[in-house]
């Protein structure tokens, strides 16, 4: 990753035309691993809060960066002990994880978020 930029190009029909994402301008980003919406998006929050959050299509380069340098999490509803309504994802950067993913899932009743640290899930 030269000069803290990642090539978003995924190849094929969904190629992003060689666009590079400048990680210095990204405050955080996350994607869902098993969302029922079949989302193929990465949700990005820029460092400049005057710029709206945006999304981009998942590419192998971007999801690999988030997985390797981020943290795994899941959101769930109140029935998390007996239920099966879990949505897993990855958040980058790990040390800056916030409640954006659980806010996104609130419409599905997800009000809890757990983060994987040292091999165990802990409430955020």
Image (cartoon, grey):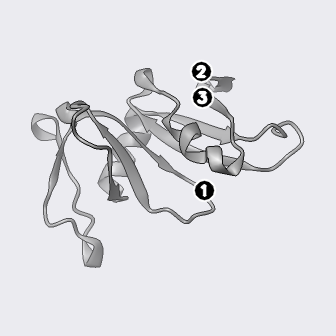
Furthest residue toward front: 50
Q: Could you say whether the residue bearing mark 2 is in a helix, strand or loop?
A: loop
Look at the numbered discs 2 and 1 and tell me whether their residues touch, using CB distance below 8 Å: no
Q: Is residue 124 above or below residue 60?
A: above
Lower position in the chain sequence, tag 3 or tag 1: 1
The residue to which callout 3 is attached is 115
Q: Quadrant of the C terminus?
A: top right
Q: How far separated are the C-alphas under marks 3 and 1?
A: 16 Å
The crowding category of the residue bearing disc 3, from other C-alpha atoms within 10 Å (few below 14, some 14 to 19, many at least 20), is: many
Residue at figure coordinates x 21%, y 65% from the top left: 16
Q: Could you say whether the residue bearing mark 3 is in a helix, strand or loop?
A: strand
Q: How far separated are the C-alphas under marks 2 and 1?
A: 22 Å
Toward which corner of the image does residue 3 lie, by quadrant?
top left
Mark 2 against mark 1, which lies toward the viewer?
1
Which label belongs to residue 118? 2
Q: Could you say whether the residue bearing mark 1 is in a helix, strand or loop?
A: loop
Lower position in the chain sequence, tag 2 or tag 1: 1
Mark 3 against mark 2, which lies toward the viewer?
3
- Residue 104: x and y in percent read 54, 45
- Residue 33: x and y in percent read 55, 53
Toward which corner of the image does residue 18 lie, by quadrant?
bottom left
Furthest residue toward left: 3
- Residue 14: x and y in percent read 29, 72
Which label belongs to residue 34? 1
Look at the numbered discs 3 and 1 and tell me whether their residues touch, using CB distance below 8 Å: no
Q: How far separated are the C-alphas under marks 3 and 2?
A: 10 Å
């Amino acid at each position: 990753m030269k000069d803290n930029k990642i090539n978003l190009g995924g190849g094929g029909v969904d190629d992003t035309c060689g666009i590079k994402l400048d990680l210095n301008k990204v405050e955080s980003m996350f994607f869902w691993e098993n969302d029922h919406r079949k989302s193929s998006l990465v949700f990005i929050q820029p460092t400049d809060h005057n710029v709206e959050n945006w999304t981009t299509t998942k590419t192998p380069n971007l999801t690999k960066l988030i997985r390797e340098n981020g943290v795994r999490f899941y959101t769930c509803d109140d029935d998390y002990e007996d239920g099966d309504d879990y949505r897993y994802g990855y958040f980058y950067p790990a040390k800056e994880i916030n409640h954006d993913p659980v806010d996104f899932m609130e419409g599905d009743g997800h009000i809890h978020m757990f983060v994987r640290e040292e091999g165990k899930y802990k409430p955020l």
